[in-house]
Image (cartoon, grey):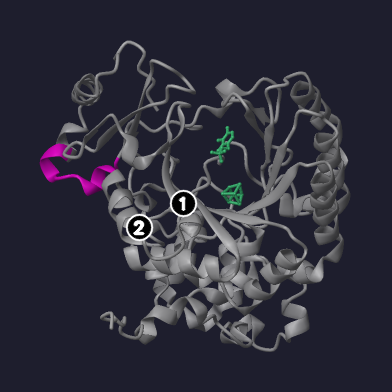
Amino acid sequence: MPIMHKKPPAPPDAFEHTRLLQGEFWHRIPAYAQVDEATFLDHLWQQKQSVKTAEELLSTIGSVASQEFIEDARRGFELAPMAVRVSPYAISLIDWNDPYNDPIRTQFIPVASKLLSDHPRLTLDSLHEQDDSPVPGLVHRYVDKALFLPLNVCPVYCRFCTRSYAIGPDTENVDKVSLAKTPAQWHDAFNYIAERPELEDIVISGGDAYQLPPKNIELIGNALLDIPHVRRMRFATKGPAIMPMKILTHPQWVDAVTNIVDRGRKLGKEVVLHTHFNSPNEITWITEKAMRVLFERGIFVRNQSVLIRGVNDDAHAMQLLVKRLGHINVHAYYVYMHDLVKGVEELRTTIQAAVDIEKFVRGSTAGFNTPTFVCDAPGGGGKRDVHSYDFYDRENGIAVYSAPSVKPGKAFVYFDPIDKLSPEIQARWVIPQMQEEMIRNAIRKAGLPTDELVLA
Ligand SMILES: *Cc1c(COP(=O)(O)O)cnc(C)c1O
Ligand code: SF4
């Protein structure tokens, strides 16, 4: 008889990813106490009721948050470089008894008391997208793929948005703006793509494809499918994470995406959705139902998260997110280092934290549902596996990357947040000559040329 090694039964904790928030959870919020399910699931109601000012926040959550928090948020709204916009769905998922530590509050509602000074090397558009932009609304950085930005509005505004240089509301009525003025401008981007046979892969981002009216989803989708060398397309949207009900109550939008996916399939081309869940708390029974609609239609969904302090920089929270994504048939693709973005330094963390969390998460579930942790190298080097640094000076918080297939011969540098460094090192970062010396030393140790140095 062979000796059998029976695994002990999994503890109850091992099933946490399958336990999604149920019921009419929004009734916890005073303004939504009387809101029935049909209303809460209505995507137009969600858009109209989105919270955009401190006054709207106060009138929505009223007595459930402390006066101290409300005041802190009011000052936070004033100081924030990014417009605020939070869906009722997201508002309902925040633990208002402890808003300071809540992962959804942290992403969308700024509080003045938590703000830190920006890193001294931070610039607007740290990824230098403008430098790789041949026509307005197109970023052509990698050889075979490009990023198409057909709009600058989103269903919510994330405090940490990489494109805070471009993203923000023109007016309240989002659909009108993109209907009225954009299709003519998109033409130049389509022409550029058509003239570049090496472009096989187009990311349609923004802004957010959730805000594109159905006819523009089809216009853009068909224009790109008509270009023979375009083989892959992805529509990027934060929507499923913060307003999943749109997939249940805006059938014209889902049909438009389905039409493009189906037409692509007939042409042998891949069309998928890319979304942006950051916290396991964002995934509820509504999300599960919405993702089921996409799954049944054969629409593949990948997820890109950002590693955010206080949101998912805890190994267990990240593991739960990854397993929960698998549970709803969303493929965990990337976890990004938080870019160097103005006014949100308290949300960044270190390269070391990313390496540690990745180590913990890998092995928890299927390899294809395990995300790659990447750093989009400041200065335009593109995404690098966080582990692939040429040199990492942990003491001074400087990671040096190179990107031989993107910008050969150049060094790209990512900086850990200053407040995570020791007090002596923090003092060094105050002196510009010291900064220069620390950075040049790190690049030299990486074996890369400092003359080609691209600083953030
Ligand atoms: C992220 C990105 C892409 C897509 O990169 P993948 O690694 O294929 O997901 C394309 N262009 C730009 C400019 C990007 O930032
Ligand atoms: S949804 Fe995306 S583009 Fe819009 S604010 Fe958030 S991160 Fe930026």
- Judging by the rendered image, the residue that carries numbered circle 2 is 114
Amino acid type, callout 2: Lys
The answer to whether residue 376 is above or below residue 86 is above
Question: Which residue is rendered at x = 46% and y = 19% of the image?
Answer: 407
| Between 168 and 62, the one nearer to me in the picture | 168
- Image quarter for residue 317? bottom left
The answer to whether residue 65 is above or below residue 250 is below
Q: What stretch is highlighted in magenta?
A: 416-425
Q: Is mark 2 on a helix, strand or loop?
A: helix
Amino acid type, callout 1: Val
- Residue 267: x and y in percent read 83, 41
Question: Which residue is rendered at x = 69% and y = 71% of the image?
Answer: 292
419 is within the stretch colored magenta: yes
Q: Which of labels 1 and 2 is toward the front? A: 1
Question: Which residue is rendered at x = 67% and y = 20% of the image?
Answer: 134
The answer to whether residue 73 is above or below residue 185 is below
Question: Which residue is rendered at x = 11% and y = 40% of the image?
Answer: 424
Mark found first going from the N terminus, 1 or 2:
2
| Between 3 and 180, the one nearer to me in the picture | 3
- Which quarter of the figure is the N terminus placed in? bottom left
Tell me the crowding category of disc 2: few under 14, some 14 to 19, or many 20 or more residues within 10 angstroms, Cα based.
some
Majority secondary structure of the magenta segment? helix
- Judging by the rendered image, the residue that carries numbered circle 1 is 306
Cβ at disc 1 under 8 Å from ligand 2: yes
